[in-house]
Amino acid sequence: MAQFDVYGNTNAETEDHIPYLLDVQADLLDSLSTRVVVPLISHAALGKPIIHLNPRFDIEDNTVFMSTAELAGVPVRILGLKIMSLKDRRDVILAALDFLLAGF
């Protein structure tokens, strides 16, 4: 598992509007049995995105938005298959987390 990896959502009740989970936890904490993730959700589930809080990503022909305010800790065992890495979007992801936590 690596920071900024994207995993499929294995929860049948939520996978339609939250198809992916973005791992934002530091690699240093890999030994924990939990990961901090942010849901990547469809536009319809989000409504109007806030630019700095909800960056947009294209994953597997799906446009999704980072639902930063729904940050959560989850057991590693619930994460689905790794789909891809968003490491190249690190600055945008961290800016959204900073905006959530510090307001800038």
Image: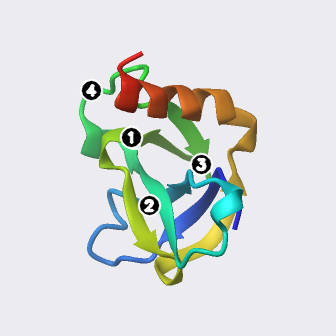
Which residue lies under the disc numbered 3?
A: 61
Which residue lies under the disc numbered 1?
A: 68
- Residue type at the position of mark 2: Pro
Q: How crowded is mark 2: few (under 14 residues within 10 Å), some or many (20 or more)?
A: many
Marked residue nearer the N-terminal end (1 or 4) = 4
Tell whether 78 sits left or right of 18.
right
Marked residue nearer the N-terminal end (4 or 2) = 2
Tell whether 54 sits left or right of 25.
left
Percent position of residue 41, x then y: 38, 49
Farthest-out residue, right: 88
> Which tag is nearer the camera, tag 1 or tag 2?
1
Q: Residues within 10 Å of mark 3 (few under 14, many from 20)?
A: few
- Image disc number at residue 19: 2
Marked residue nearer the N-terminal end (3 or 1) = 3
Marked residue nearer the N-terminal end (2 or 3) = 2
Q: Quadrant of residue 2?
A: bottom right
Marked residue nearer the N-terminal end (4 or 3) = 4
**Can you say which quadrant of the picture contains the C terminus?**
top left
Label 4 – label 2 distance at C-alpha: 18 Å
> Which tag is nearer the camera, tag 1 or tag 4?
1
